[in-house]
Image: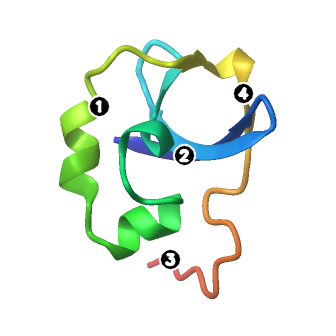
Amino acid sequence: MRLASFNVNGRDSYGIVTQDEGIVDLGKRLNQRSLVDLLRSDALNEARRVSKDQPDYSLSDISLRLPIQGGEKIVCV
């Protein structure tokens, strides 16, 4: 599952990037306000449930943003 933060029509959101180059808008479907909130609340199972939905936007319709907005630390291992 590939997650992304994006902006569409002046609204910031986050979602799942699908294999057919679209994005399922999780910001419209889930209670978490941002990708950080989704990860902090351990709600990935909720995201997986809607990952097979039809994409809301094509990648050409959106502007990708930094994955984690205002992140305190990003550690990669």
Q: Earlier in the sequence, mark 2 or mark 3?
A: 2
Q: Earlier in the sequence, mark 1 or mark 2?
A: 2
Circle 2 is placed at which residue position?
A: 14
Circle 1 is placed at which residue position?
A: 51
**Label 1, label 3: how far apart the Cα atoms are:** 25 Å
Percent position of residue 12, x then y: 69, 46
Q: Are marks 4 and 1 in contact (CB under 8 Å)?
A: no
Which residue corresponds to the image point at 29% horizontal and 45% vertical from the top-left? 47
Q: Earlier in the sequence, mark 2 or mark 4?
A: 2
Circle 4 is placed at which residue position?
A: 62
Three-letter residue code for mark 3: Cys
* Crowding at mark 4 (Cα within 10 Å: few <14, some 14-19, many 20+): some
**Label 4, label 3: how far apart the Cα atoms are:** 27 Å
Q: Nearer the viewer, residue 53 or 66?
A: 53
Circle 3 is placed at which residue position?
A: 76
Which residue corresponds to the image point at 51% horizontal and 59% vertical from the top-left? 33
Where disc 1 sits, the SS reads loop
Which residue corresponds to the image point at 29% horizontal and 31% vertical from the top-left? 51
Three-letter residue code for mark 1: Ser
Which residue corresponds to the image point at 72% horizontal and 18% vertical from the top-left? 61
Kindly report which numbered mark, 1 or 3, lies closer to the viewer in this rendering.
Answer: 1
Where disc 3 sits, the SS reads loop
Where disc 4 sits, the SS reads loop
**Label 4, label 1: how far apart the Cα atoms are:** 18 Å
